[in-house]
Amino acid sequence: MKTLTLSFGLAFEDLHDREGLARIDAIFLKQLAESSPALRLRLLDARRDPTALAAKPASELIIEIAPYLEDFIGTLFGIESALRDAQARHHDLAPLYSVKRKFVQRKALTGQTPEKAAAIDGFAVRAELEAFLLEPLTERSFANHVDRWLQSEADHAEPLRLAALYAAWATLTPEGKAEHRSGILFKTPHKLDMHHLVPAESVGADGLVQLRFSSGHWRHREGFQLTDPGMDLVGALDNAHYCIKCHNQGKDSCSTGLKERDGAFRASVFGVKLAGCPLDEKISEMNVVKENGNPIGALAIVTVDNPMCAATGHRICNDCMKSCVFQKQDPVDIPQVETRSLKDVLELPWGFEIYS
């Protein structure tokens, strides 16, 4: 059995002992002083009087400290290499989200309609585009090449024109959507019909009306095991980028609730009070740190208010989604980001010990 050996002369027992945790904290503060003396002073000031710090400066402090905490944890557990690999997986996906926002949504779809897109031969355009890619077209290869072409648009006018046509076809036509069913690059938020949140059709059988769901909705169940494995890193980061980081305006309704002008909580069309996360979890801040590529930092922000996040996330609650600022379109899938943040840490060496 592998034995956990901590850095800085610390023992495993220090993780579960108040005096040991105090020693760990002192070492962290010492390292923070060496890296960023001003940040250490701000942290100490906040600890002395947490109520004196306004919401936005408190959020900024937490976000700024997260990478330093992550580096410290990596050193403490001796997993620097594994942690760098995890961070790299986040950063390698960055072109997907920047190209989705800056190129697909802001350029390729401008002036396009489903009718216009239907006139595009997406498969023929793909063949032409692959001649420039010099590899099969996938969402990752598309994003990586478009990201590079955008740095010198004048020199890549033709491949960018083809890329725009393909993006319109993939996003707006049934054939294109089917081709990229499992991806995120060519998906746009849908408008919500609060009385038809789950796509279904009514079917008459034996004198009764049954609701029939799409084939993708049905999943085989074995006992009480989860039938939904949850989002992968690509999907979770897509939602983290989709979030508009409302904490910057003090309107992070996903966390603190969606309120009327008189300060009362707004109610949904079903009369459900939109009070946000019952734990006031720092959701917007988590999304910032997650999209910045700091998996341990993101989980640390979650556990400030929700140390039992292994029992929440996409498995149990969605009060945060109901109160998301996006009320007329798909909300940010916050529970999936939370659960993915936990899983990414649990997949590291000593992941459970880091979480606990």
Image: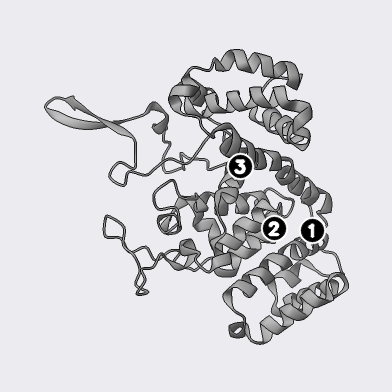
Tell which residue pokes out farthest to the left in this image: 207
Displayed quadrant of residue 222: top left
Q: Which mark is residue 7?
A: none
Is residue 158 shown above or below 229?
Answer: above
Task: Quote the CA–CA distance across marks 1 and 3.
Answer: 32 Å
The answer to whether 192 is drawn above or below residue 254 in the figure is above
List x then y, in percent, for residue 351. Answer: 69, 54
Quarter-of-image position of residue 144 = top right
Mark 2–mark 3 distance (CA, rounded to whole Å): 26 Å
Per the image, label 1 sits on a secondary structure element best described as: helix
Earlier-in-chain disc, 2 versus 1: 1
In the image: residue 189, left or right of residue 294: left
Q: Which mark is residue 74?
A: 1
| Res 296 label | 2
Q: How is the image coloured?
A: one colour
Which residue position is annotated with label 3?
Answer: 101
Q: Are marks 2 and 3 in contact (CB under 8 Å)?
A: no
| 29 on left or right of 206 | right
Instruction: Rate crowding at label 1 as few (under 14), some (14 to 19) or many (20 or more) other CA atoms within 10 Å.
Output: many
The three-letter amino acid code for the residue at tag 2 is Ile
**Label located before the other in sequence (2 or 3):** 3
What is the three-letter code of the residue carrying label 3? Arg
Q: Is residue 147 visible?
A: yes
- Tell me the distance, in whole angstroms, between the alpha carbons under discs 2 and 1: 9 Å
Q: For numbered disc 2, what is the local secondary structure?
A: helix
Question: Considering the numbered disc 3 on the image, is that residue within a helix, a strand or a loop?
Answer: helix
> Tag 1: residue type?
Gly
